[in-house]
Image: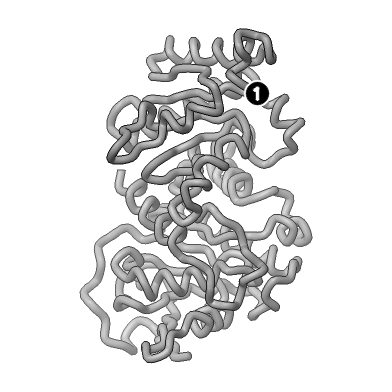
Amino acid sequence: MTDVFAPGSTPCSAPDARPLLAITQGDPAGIGPEIIAKAFRDAPDQMQGAFVVGELATLRRAAACVRQPGIADLPVAVIASPTQAREMPPRCLPVLPLAGLPGPLPYGVVAAQAGRAAADCVVWAAQAALRGDIAAVVTAPLHKEALHAAGVDFPGHTELLQAQAAAHAGVQRGQMPVRMMLASEELCTVLVSIHMALRDALDAVTRDNVLQTLRITHAALFKSLGRRPRIGVAGLNPHAGEAGLFGREEIDVIAPAIAAARSEGLDASGPWAPDTVFMRARNTPAHPGEFDVVVAMYHDQGLIPVKYLGVDKGVNVTLGLPLVRTSPDHGTAFDIAGTGRADASSLIEAVRWARRLSAQ
């Protein structure tokens, strides 16, 4: 595999003026590095101005993994600073090596080393974004079990980024509330709770949490849409409780939160039956959506509809942070890691969404 050392050792196209994006390598035992390599190979226009934070030999292995017969190898460029990513020619993989990361690890194996490496890349990228050195962060998948094995006391990207942003702002983590949005061109959903047991997620459906979710959703989408977003709110119970027959959360918790949001000028409505609200919000040429976004009460309620429409189309966006962060909406896929079969479409969409959001 050819390495290109930048700057100055290879002819480069004219510098690209688009915002700089850092892509974290993800868990090195998973598909993250290879979908990154595929994205730089197959979507050169989208990837201009982007670079990877990771370990050189791991990304070199990924580039070799996605080789195609009769097509030139994807060169790997070593850069020393984010701005050098703008000097890279198309179909070139710029890597900003992070000191202390382990070399290539076995594919498909949960390992503390892999979890620590993935977390270290996220921390570096978050801090660079908070300093203003880069415009956005795109995170390749990490493995939560590996993260836990490494002693990282966060269940996933969202909470890790929240902690970094809170520390940068000098506030407690709870003072910087964040929410997960899964977005595609057809459907966007925001979650009241994220990574917790379902029993705990039910307890998290409180008036304050629902109202806070509505406020965060409104603020984030108002900025990107340039108008008040139309927010449809899903109920918790079947048929949104059927006027209290199947539970009172809609009456006692969700409806009061919506009323409070509307009194603040938010365009929120519901609670709507959760088995139909996502269909009503789906936006297609033949069926313009009634809502710009649906607020769902817990993780699977909101993520299943978006993922059903196609994991190659969905993008994970963290709302409430003082930085732009997107991610593909799939995991590490240990079962196919290293085979070159992983689909890079969701990562490419994540880069596209990061550019869109960082341009606001």
How far across and down, in percent of the image, does residue 32 sit?
55, 67
User: Dividing the image into 4 quarters, which one contains the C terminus?
Assistant: top left
**Lateral position of residue 86 relative to residue 220, left or right:** left
Q: Residue furthest front?
A: 286
Q: Residue at x 45, y 80 (%)?
A: 78
For residue 289, what is the image quadrant?
A: top left
Q: Position of residue 91 (x, y in %)?
A: 34, 77
Q: Which residue is mark 1?
A: 205
From what the image shows, is residue 90 above or below residue 321? below
Q: How far across and how far down the image is residue 235, in percent?
A: 57, 21
Residue, x 58% and y 18% (percent of image)? 240
Whether residue 108 is visible, yes or no, is yes
Residue placed most toward the observer, 328 or 8: 328
Which structural element holds mark 1?
loop
Name the foreground residue: 281 vs 118. Answer: 281
| Residue reaching furthest to the left | 14
Q: On screen, 188 above or below 127?
A: above
Q: Residues within 10 Å of mark 1 (few under 14, many from 20)?
A: some
User: In the image, is residue 112 above or below residue 229?
Assistant: below
The mark tally for this picture is 1
Q: Please state which amino acid type lies under the numbered disc 1.
A: Val
